[in-house]
Amino acid sequence: MALYFAKIGRCFNMTIDRATREDLEAILQLQYLAYQSEAELFGTQDIPPLKQTLDEVVREYEEGIILRMTDEQNRIIGSVRAKEQDGTVYIGKLMVHPEYRRRGLGSALLTEIEKWYPGKRYELFTRTRSVDNIRLYRKMGYTPFRQEAVTDELVFDYLEKRKPFQCCESLAKPKYYLCRRYFPELPIERNWFGELIREVIAVDGALFPKEEQTVLTEEQAMTIEIEDGDQVLRVLRVPGEKESSDIPAIAAQTVEGFEFCGYDLADSWVSAILNCGSFVEGDYYSKAFDYRELNEFGLIPDYQSAVRISRKLREEYPGEEHVYCDVFAIWRRINAI
């Protein structure tokens, strides 16, 4: 890919393509140079990018893709690398020569590496102190989803960019689960459940452990015999970043044998609505919503409110664990009620 960028009042030709094995030594030398700014930020040369060996770069080359960016004299002035595993593309070592920074070259490299893995989930990380990196990643559509503290001084932000939501595709593939029913003990074991919640239904791996769930086909979900204390749930991920006018109508549609219960907000493990005490500011409210808005199952009753709360959580609790959630519509088989 050839692009043109401004350089001291004129244009220069810049090319991004796949690196060859012969490029790896030059890319490693560029890495040693480009990461000096990170070393200065932390006051030490003892950081992994400055300690990496050529053999390690060769191994990354063999296991994934390394791109190179070259200027008009065919000098390597930028690079990025990535590897796919289980549907996620892990991106790392995004670097630009110090003399060529702040000209959009990092964005161009990130855009190009994504093209090599279309339609995937992308993940990368950077130090929390690396403000410029985080600003770039956010501009490119990445959102933080967790932090990892190595020491008090060394904290990493992990960011992700998900595959754009395809409404028709997802709506064609709801998931069905057989799991136990969950009734809060009295007195209420968590004050953020509220007094009006008689039974909890949620997409939550703590309240409903995955090892205690059985994934069903649609036919099994309709015909399986349900024992006392069990239930069959129909779960559908729906757009949360951008509101879709189609979703309320979808929830209102009759799904034979099922009753619509409401919407949950959850990441891969925890429900931000029912099982995240760090959002609790008082008996019944957080900065993002009032827990008395929830229905008898502890779910958000309407889609517009789910989108509003999802956005508000991101605004009020930036960087907080479990705040970057998907929106899930949940139905339950009627004869379990």
Image (cartoon, rainbow, N blue to C red):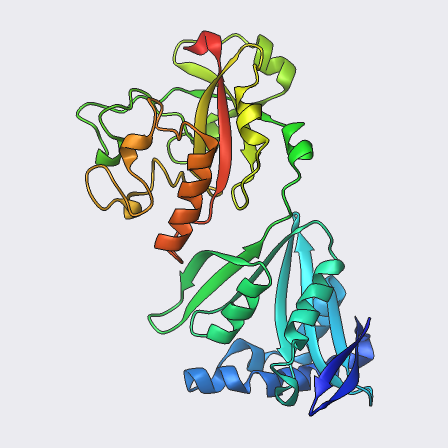
Specify whether 5 is left or right of 142: right
As drawn, 148 above or below 175: below
Q: Residue furthest left?
A: 187
Which corner quadrant holds the C terminus? top left
Q: Residue at x 40, y 38 (%)?
A: 271
- Residue 86 lies, in percent from the top left, at 65, 47
In-front residue for pair 236/42: 236
In this rendering, does residue 29 appear at all? Answer: yes
Q: Residue at x 36, y 23 (%)?
A: 297
- Residue 23 lies, in percent from the top left, at 78, 80
Quadrant of the rendered image containing residue 112: bottom right
Quadrant of the rendered image containing residue 28: bottom right
As drawn, 266 above or below 233: below
Q: Residue at x 63, y 63 (%)?
A: 91
In this rendering, does residue 204 appear at all? Answer: no
In-front residue for pair 165/252: 252
- Residue 10 lies, in percent from the top left, at 75, 89
The mark total stands at: 0
Q: Residue at x 68, y 63 (%)?
A: 82
Q: Residue furthest bottom?
A: 8
Which corner quadrant holds the N terminus? bottom right
